[in-house]
Structures are given as structure tokens and as C-alpha cells.
Amino acid sequence: MQNRKPKLGFTRFAEIWNGRLAMLGFVSVVLIELITGRGILTQLGLI
């Protein structure tokens, strides 16, 4: 019998990747704003 760790839910692995992808998204939004000179809400047509 193997002791399997859960692959879904609030696991250390999932939270590390969630943090990495959040940082990547934040940096992407900042770079797009610097390049275009318009905020993300303006680009999406919300303002």
C-alpha cells in the first residue's frame, strides 16, 4: 500500500505554483501598462 499525497486542494505544491503564476500575472499587467500607457481597466473598456 502506498501513502499517496493529495494532488488537489490547498497543498504546498499548489500554493507555490499559485503564487508563482500570480506574480507572473502581476508583472505582465505592469509591463503592459508601461508599454501602452493605459491601465488594464481602460484597455478592457471598463473605464
Image (cartoon, rainbow, N blue to C red):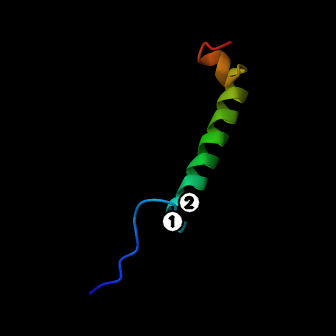
What is the total number of numbered labels drawn onto the structure image?
2
- Give the x, y percent position of residue 47: 68, 12
Question: Could you tell whether 22 is left or right of 33 in the image?
Answer: left
Secondary structure of the residue carrying numbered label 1: loop
Q: Residue at x 55, y 53 (%)?
A: 18
Which amino acid type corresponds to the residue marked 1 in the rendered image? Answer: Thr
Q: Does 6 sit above or below residue 19?
A: below
Which amino acid type corresponds to the residue marked 2 in the rendered image? Answer: Glu
The label number, if any, that marks residue 11 in the structure image: 1
Viewer-proximal residue among 36 and 11: 11
- Give the x, y percent position of residue 34: 72, 29
Residue annotated with mark 2: 15
Quadrant position of residue 38: top right
Q: Residue at x 30, y 84 (%)?
A: 2
Q: Residue at x 66, y 20 (%)?
A: 41
Q: Does 25 sit above or below residue 32?
A: below
Viewer-proximal residue among 33 and 4: 4
Quadrant position of residue 27: top right
Question: Could you tell whether 1 is left or right of 6 in the image?
Answer: left
The label number, if any, that marks residue 20 in the structure image: none
Residue that extends furthest to the left in the rendered view of this protein? 1
Q: Are marks 2 and 1 in contact (CB under 8 Å)?
A: yes
Secondary structure of the residue carrying numbered label 2: helix
Question: Could you tell whether 2 is left or right of 18 in the image?
Answer: left
- Give the x, y percent position of residue 1: 26, 87
Q: CA distance from mark 2 to mark 1?
A: 6 Å
Q: Does 46 sit above or below residue 14?
A: above
Viewer-proximal residue among 7 and 19: 7
- Give the x, y percent position of residue 42: 66, 16
Q: Residues within 10 Å of mark 1 (few under 14, many from 20)?
A: few
Q: Does 39 sit above or below residue 47?
A: below
